Image: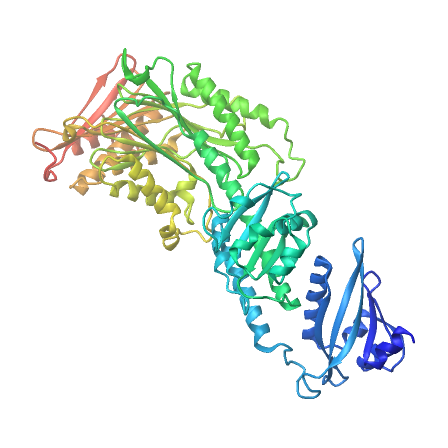
Amino acid sequence: MRTEDVLAAIATGLWRWDNASGIVSLDAEAARLLGLPAEPVRLSEAAVRSRFHPVDWNEIDGVVGLAVAEGTLAEARLRIMDERGRVVRTVRSRSKPLIKGSDYQLVGTLQEVADPQPGTAGPHTPITGDWRRSREAFLLDAGRALAEARSTAEVLRVAASLSMPGFSPDGLAVFGMSGDRLTVIGHHGQQDGDEGPFTSMSLRTDYPAAEVVRTGRAIYLPSPEEYRRRFPTTWPLAEPFERQSWAFVPLVVAGRTMGAWMAAFKHPVTFTPDERSVLTTVARMLAQALARAGVAESERELSLGLQRTMMPVLGPGIPGIRVAARYVPTGGGLQVGGDWYDMIRLPGGTEGGTGGGAGRIALVIGDVQGHDVRAAALMGQLRIALRAYASEGHRPDAVLSRASRFLYGVNDGYDGADGAGAPGGGPRFATCLYLEVDLETGTVDIARAGHPDPAVRMVDGTVLLRPTAGGLPLGIDADADYPTTRLTLDPGETLMICTDGLLETGGHDLDSGWERVKRLLEKHRGDDLEELADSLVEAVHGPGSHHTTGPLADRREDDIAVLLLSRLPATTVRQTPRRTLMTIAQAEPERIAEAREQVRQLLHDWTDEDQLDAAVLMVSEMVTNVLVHTDGDALLTAEVACGEKARLLRVEVSDASDELPHKRHPGEMASSGRGLVLMEMLADAWGVAPRGEGKTIWFELTEPTEPEGCCP
């Protein structure tokens, strides 16, 4: 008797599904069970699919994939539908995959089963009821929890907390590979140290996890007898744990087996197709979560390494100053970028400040365009170049000119052929701020290449943005010039330099971001620079910053670098004057507005508003006169100091011309000649003083009502 006749006698049909061609072959009994004429037939996959309940077809698709991956039987119950969408019968399908390369054929049987009764289930009735729903809910929750895990330890904690519907394991272990050795990444449900015999086990060992890693196929051991029979050599290692069933499932990412996951049970588990499907799905999500965590941890290590290389190495502490710095990469992706800071001991300085004064140091902060590996590489090159030029003893303007020429040469090999924005394509530029600090006098010489200006927090808490002359970002012009600006950092004052990420993070532009940072600096109490650096970063980068966003519609996130330097306060802090200094060049008349703003900031707590307006007006007149009537630049110096009974404002504007101003009597319609007349009317005192080469015109104002506690 033929096999087909035997199967027909027991109401069992035979079918074959060719995955490559999509053709399904049915014998007569299989055709009858599908509601077709009882004769052999070859149909397309779509034609066969139309005979099954759509929910069941999706289910069998997953079961078949599991069987192909594991080389096991695929078994499922399927509802057969008629043309009007009614369930006419339920059949059990059992099939075996025959794999040929990337293609496979399924050869199996169909047999009618008694439940559910025909006609009692509607077209949307689930075949396995609540178990299926609870399984789907479990997989959704597990996938969400594993997707949110950001480290290997978090992934392992999530895996240990998973409660699988109906068959939760009480012991878990995750195995990895190191060369030809098996390693234990983590485990749960065992005592610390129990993993010892399984650590650094050869992949050739007759152990289930080792075989899974070698073959990429899952191993299910439903009983201790089965474990002992299949793995007699390593059974003594598993026996003390007194488990009843084990599942060893491969961890596969992008087609590569990266390890194995063991789920062990104290109760017997038969590992039905549904249970194997759940375990395989969890293993797939676990593998992806571990891979993501590994990448994230590598990125964090790279970021930490970058930060360590950027931290200034000063050796012994430098007397007379405090320094604090922070670098925070933006979140997401590879957390490296082009921001950096540095602190360089310059020639002529002494270690530890011994033998001839505290010497000089250079502060550097910069930002290479972009946020990728190439930006980080260029940052490293540029940082080394700046160190080299500074160590040769060049002045700030020469250091930046040479650095710009260096970056221009590096960029010469990139012509943008990859397209705008393409990784690695086109030249890169860098902004930079270079400061040379004389630690004995507090003199700071600054050269700026397209970078945000420095800020100074004075002894009384007043914070001023110090406008400086500047040039193009580095790398744009090989022959770019960088003028130098000089200011003085008095004892007790703190200098802050930063990249634009500190200002613009959280939806701010440079102006609104500066106002935010200024408030933070003014609010800080005490002289702990580490605490101040932390508060600056936390305020603009921490969770609280997301509740106080800036005025821009988009939230432009960027790396943050900030460096703080403070001169130790003098013994008589209240006697230290409040001072600002800036140069207004002939070619920069627009900076007169900056000069007015500097004076307003300097006098932010001046009690007489009329005097404040008068001071701003006189400064504007004095600086304008220099630019109009001379060929040189104007040097503005403004200082607020405590006099005998009240505070005194003294403002000086110097230039290189020897021609002294003369008081005139302008007519009613005259457009000039009122400068000295205004000073005579508004100032408490004023004058003109020759200064060798050039002259200085000055005025003084005495605050009529002194803030309490300012002067002795």
Q: Where does the N terminus fall, quadrant-wise? A: bottom right
Closest to the observer, 517 or 358: 358
Locate residue 24 relative to residue 475 in the image: left or right.
right
Q: Residue furthest bottom?
A: 119
Residue 347 left/right relative to 166:
left
Relative vertical location of residue 191 with respect to residue 527 in this rendering, above or below: below
Query: Residue 329 placed where, x, y %?
Result: 46, 41
* In-image side of 394 versus 439 (left or right): right
Left or right: 391 as drawn, with respect to 221: left
Where residue 41 appears, as percent x and y from the top left, is 88, 75
Q: Of residues 74 and 451, which is closer to you in this image? A: 74
Mark count: 0
**Res. 512 in view:** no
Q: Nearer the viewer, residue 430 or 11?
A: 11
The spot of residue 262 in percent (x, y) is 57, 55
| Residue occupying the far right of the picture | 1
Q: Residue at x 54, y 34 (%)?
A: 375
Picture quadrant where residue 621 is located: top left
Residue 412 visible? The answer is: yes
In which quadrant is the C terminus drawn?
top left
Residue 436 sits above or below residue 42 on the image: above
The quadrant where residue 460 appears = top left
- Residue at left 57%, top 74%? 131
**Residue 145 or residue 651, whichever sits in front:** 145
Residue at left 17%, top 33%?
A: 681
- The x and y percentages for residue 577 are 19, 29
Question: Is 665 situated above or below 14?
Answer: above
